[in-house]
Image (cartoon, rainbow, N blue to C red):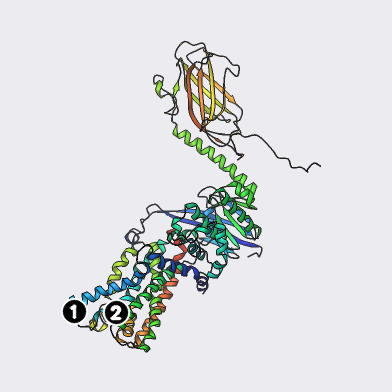
C-alpha cells in the first residue's frame, strides 16, 4: 500500500520518463514522430507481401489475422527483451538519487504501452480499410484485455529487470527466450492448429488468453469467451503481485550491485 | 523519535561485498558460486547520531571513510545492514545534478524531467519553473536543446533545479563547485537562505572553510566510526590536524621507499643526485656527496611541518686542493619564486678544508611556509663566489602547514575584537 502511495507521489516522474522516451526516441530523424506509425505500417506491408503472395496458407486475410496479434505481442516481447536491462541502464540515477525504484520498470512498460496504442491506431485503420465488420460490443472488451496485458507485462518486467541486476546474462538470454515464447503463443497461428498433446504448454502461457482475446475482438469481431477472460485476469493479477513482491526485495541492493 | 530531531541514525552498520573477481554471469553464479571470492568490507561500524530540525551539519572525513555511504543511507539509495534510520519531513538530495537530462530536449523540458525525479508533481514544478529559470540565468536559452549548452550552463540549470526543490531535509554532496565565482556565491547565498528558513541540511565536503562558515555542527567519520562530533570549527580543526599528521607520515613513508640509497659512487660523478635529472655545475674541486633534509625529530625526511625546526646535512668530498668552502642553500616555489636563501659566508662562518671528506650541518628555525611542494637548492662555492658544485634543484620536498591560511608564508597572528573608539 505504502509503495502505491509513493509511486503516486512520483507520478510526474513516470510521466516525464515516458514523455522523454517517446519524444526522445525519434529526435533527430527527418520523419520524427511519424516513425511511430510508419514502423507498424511497414511491418504490415512486409507480412502482407510474404504471406499473401509467397507463403500462402489457408487462413483468410492472414496478414490481418497475424497483425492484430503481432502488435500486442511486440509490446509484450519488447517489454521482456529490452525491459530486462531497464534498471541497469538507469544505474547512474539509481546509484545517486532516491526515488521509488518501481518507477523505472513502470515507465518503461508504460512507454512501450503507449507505443502499442499508437500502433493500434494503424491496426484499426487497416481493419476498417479491409472492410471487415467491427463488433462494437466486442470492442468494449478491448480496453480490459489491454489492461490485463499491461499488468502481465509490468509484473514480468519488474521480475526480470530486477533479477538482471544480479545476473547480467538474463538480458542476453531474453532475446532467444522471447523468440521461443512467440512460437509457444498463438501469434502466427490459431489455437486450432496446435496438436492436442502440446495444448498444456499453451494453457500455461499467460500470453495465450491475451492474444486469443485480441484476435477474437479485432479479427473475428466477437466477444472473447468468459473462460479466456478469467484466465487472463488471473494471470495478470498473479504476475503483477509476484513481480511487485520480488522487486521489493531485489531493489534493496540495486545501488551496490550496479 | 524525538520531535525535535529531523534525522535519527541508530547503530547503523553497512558493509559491501567487494568481489575480487567480479563474476556476474549466469555461468559463474551457477558453477562457481562457492569459488567466487569476495571481501566483506565494513564501511560503517555501528554509528549513531542525530540531527536536530533546522540544523546544518557537515560530515567530514577522508576519501573512503564512509561519509558518502552515510549520505546514501540517509537518502535511501542504500539500506543499512543493521540499525535504523528515521527521518521526519520531505528529503531532497543534491548528490547528482542533472539526473535524467536529455540532450535533445529544451532546458525547460529538462527542468520538468529533472524536477520530477526529485518527486515533484506537475503543479509544484509549474509553480517553481520561473524561479528556476531566473536562478539559472539562462532565460534566453531556456527553449534551446540542452546539448547546445556549455558545461557551465548545463550545471547551472541542474543546480537551479536542485536548489529550488523545496524540502525539509536537504542532503548535499560536495557540489558547490559549480559554475563561475559569481554563480558559486549565488549558490552559497541561496544555501544560507535555505538554512535561515529552517531547513535541515546535511553536507558532505572536504572543504573545511565551508564547514566552518556554514555549519553549526560537524561529524567527523574516520574508518567507518565517528571520530569526533560537535562544534563545526573544533571538529574541522581536529580533522585537519589528523589529516596533516597523516600526510606527513605518508609522504615520508613514500620517500623512504622511493629512495633506496642516495649515497653515490665515488667515481660516477654524473649520477650524483637525488633527482636523476638534477643538473649540477661548478669546477668540481669539491663535491656534494649527499645532502639530507632532517626534521626536528632527527629523521631524514621528504616532508616537513611548517612549524618545526629542520636541518640540512651536507656530506662532501674534496677532489682537488682547495682551502676554504662556502656552503649555500635556497628554497624556491615550483614556479621559481625564491623564498629564502643563505650561505655559510653570509652567516659569518669560515669552513676550512682539512681532510678528504667532511660534513656540514645547517640548522634552521621553522620554515613557516604554506603547504605545498618546494625546491631545495644546495651548493658549494669558493669564497670568491666561483661555483664549486652547484645544484639549482637538488630535490623537491613537501611542506605541510597546519594553519590553513593563504599566501606563501605563515605569520603567527591573531585578531583582537574591540569596541569602536569614539
Callout 2 crowding tier (Cα within 10 Å): few <14, some 14–19, many ≥20: some
Residue position marked by numbered label 1 in the rendering: A56
**Percent coordinates x, y for residue B193 in the rendering:** 64, 57
Q: Earlier in the sequence, mark 1 or mark 2?
A: 1
Callout 1: residue from which chain? A
Residue A202 badge = 2
Residue A220 badge = none
Callout 2: residue from which chain? A
Would you say residue B137 is visible in this rendering? yes
Question: Is residue A2 depicted above or below B335 in this figure?
Answer: below
Residues indicated by labels 1 and 2 sit on the same polypeptide chain: yes
Question: Is residue A249 depicted above or below A126 in this figure?
Answer: above
Contact, mark 1 vs mark 2 (Cβ under 8 Å): no
Q: Which residue shows up at 41% across the image and 20% down it?
A: B269
On-image quarter of the C terminus of chain B: top right
Q: Nearer the viewer, mark 1 or mark 2?
A: 1
Question: Is residue B246 depicted above or below B138 in this figure?
Answer: above
**Percent coordinates x, y for residue A94 in the rendering:** 46, 61
* Lateral position of residue B7 relative to residue B21, left or right: right
How far apart marks 1 and 2 lie (CA) works out to 25 Å
**Percent coordinates x, y for residue B3 in the rendering:** 66, 65
Question: Is residue B281 depicted above or below A193 in this figure?
Answer: above
Callout 1 crowding tier (Cα within 10 Å): few <14, some 14–19, many ≥20: few
Amino acid at each position: 500500500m505504502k509503495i502505491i502511495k509513493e509511486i503516486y507521489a512520483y507520478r510526474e516522474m513516470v510521466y516525464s520518463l515516458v514523455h522523454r522516451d517517446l519524444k526522445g526516441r525519434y529526435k533527430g530523424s527527418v520523419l520524427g514522430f511519424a516513425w511511430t506509425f510508419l514502423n507498424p505500417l511497414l511491418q504490415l506491408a512486409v507480412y502482407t507481401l510474404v504471406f499473401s503472395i509467397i507463403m500462402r496458407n489457408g487462413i483468410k486475410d492472414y496478414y490481418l489475422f497475424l497483425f492484430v496479434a503481432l502488435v500486442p505481442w511486440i509490446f509484450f516481447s519488447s517489454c521482456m527483451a529490452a525491459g530486462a536491462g531497464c534498471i541497469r541502464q538507469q544505474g547512474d540515477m539509481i546509484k545517486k538519487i532516491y526515488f521509488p525504484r518501481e518507477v523505472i520498470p513502470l515507465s518503461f512498460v508504460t512507454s512501450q504501452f503507449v507505443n502499442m496504442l499508437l500502433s493500434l491506431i494503424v491496426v484499426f485503420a487497416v481493419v476498417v480499410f479491409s472492410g471487415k465488420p467491427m463488433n462494437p460490443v466486442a470492442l468494449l472488451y478491448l480496453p480490459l484485455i489491454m489492461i490485463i496485458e499491461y499488468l502481465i507485462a509490468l509484473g514480468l518486467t519488474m521480475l526480470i529487470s530486477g533479477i538482471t541486476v544480479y545476473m547480467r546474462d538474463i538480458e542476453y538470454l531474453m532475446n532467444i527466450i522471447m523468440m521461443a515464447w512467440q512460437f509457444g503463443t498463438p501469434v502466427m497461428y490459431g489455437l486450432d492448429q496446435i496438436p492436442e498433446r502440446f495444448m498444456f504448454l499453451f494453457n500455461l502461457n499467460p500470453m495465450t488468453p491475451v492474444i486469443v482475446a485480441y484476435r477474437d475482438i479485432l479479427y473475428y469481431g466477437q466477444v472473447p469467451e468468459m473462460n479466456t477472460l478469467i484466465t487472463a485476469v488471473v494471470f495478470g493479477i498473479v504476475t503483477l503481485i509476484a513481480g511487485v513482491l520480488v522487486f521489493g526485495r531485489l531493489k534493496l541492493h540495486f545501488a551496490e550491485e550496479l | 523519535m524525538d520531535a525535535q530531531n529531523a534525522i535519527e541514525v541508530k547503530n547503523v552498520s553497512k558493509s559491501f561485498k567487494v568481489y575480487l573477481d567480479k563474476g556476474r554471469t549466469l555461468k559463474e553464479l551457477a558453477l562457481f558460486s562457492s569459488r567466487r571470492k569476495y571481501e566483506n568490507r565494513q564501511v560503517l561500524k555501528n554509528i549513531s547520531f542525530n540531527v536536530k530540525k533546522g540544523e546544518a551539519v557537515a560530515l567530514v572525513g577522508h576519501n573512503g571513510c564512509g561519509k558518502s555511504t552515510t549520505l546514501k543511507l540517509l537518502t535511501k539509495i542504500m539500506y543499512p545492514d543493521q540499525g535504523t534510520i528515521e527521518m521526519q519531513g520531505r528529503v531532497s538530495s543534491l548528490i547528482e545534478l542533472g539526473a535524467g537530462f536529455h540532450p535533445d530536449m529544451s532546458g525547460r523540458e529538462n527542468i520538468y524531467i529533472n524536477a520530477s525525479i526529485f518527486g515533484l508533481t506537475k503543479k509544484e514544478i509549474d509553480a517553481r519553473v520561473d524561479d528556476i529559470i531566473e536562478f539559472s540565468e539562462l532565460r534566453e536559452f531556456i527553449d534551446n536543446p540542452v546539448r547546445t549548452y556549455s558545461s557551465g550552463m548545463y550545471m547551472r540549470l541542474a543546480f537551479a533545479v536542485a536548489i529550488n526543490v523545496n524540502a525539509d531535509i536537504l542532503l548535499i554532496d560536495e557540489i558547490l563547485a559549480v559554475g563561475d565565482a559569481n554563480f558559486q556565491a549565488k549558490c552559497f547565498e541561496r544555501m544560507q537562505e535555505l538554512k535561515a528558513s529552517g531547513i535541515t541540511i546535511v553536507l558532505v565536503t572536504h572543504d573545511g572553510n565551508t564547514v566552518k562558515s556554514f555549519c553549526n555542527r560537524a561529524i567527523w567519520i574516520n574508518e567507518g566510526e565517528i571520530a569526533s562530533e560537535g562544534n563545526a570549527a573544533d571538529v574541522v580543526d581536529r580533522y585537519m590536524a589528523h589529516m596533516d599528521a597523516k600526510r606527513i607520515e605518508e609522504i615520508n613513508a613514500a620517500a623512504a621507499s622511493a629512495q633506496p640509497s642516495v649515497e653515490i659512487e665515488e667515481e660516477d660523478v654524473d649520477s650524483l643526485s637525488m633527482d636523476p635529472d638534477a643538473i649540477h655545475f661548478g669546477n668540481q674541486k669539491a663535491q656534494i656527496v649527499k645532502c639530507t633534509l632532517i626534521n626536528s625529530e632527527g629523521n631524514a625526511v621528504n616532508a616537513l611541518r611548517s612549524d618545526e625546526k629542520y636541518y640540512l646535512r651536507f656530506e662532501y668530498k674534496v677532489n682537488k686542493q682547495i682551502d676554504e668552502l662556502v656552503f649555500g642553500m635556497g628554497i624556491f616555489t615550483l614556479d621559481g619564486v625564491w623564498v629564502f636563501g643563505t650561505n655559510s659566508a653570509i652567516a659569518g662562518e669560515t669552513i676550512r678544508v682539512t681532510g678528504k671528506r667532511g660534513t656540514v650541518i645547517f640548522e634552521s628555525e621553522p620554515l613557516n611556509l604554506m603547504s605545498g611542494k618546494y625546491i631545495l637548492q644546495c651548493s658549494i662555492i669558493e669564497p670568491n663566489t666561483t661555483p664549486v658544485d652547484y645544484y639549482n634543484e637538488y630535490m623537491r620536498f613537501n611542506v605541510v602547514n597546519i594553519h590553513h591560511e593563504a599566501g606563501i608564508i605563515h605569520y603567527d597572528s591573531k585578531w583582537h575584537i574591540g569596541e569602536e573608539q569614539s
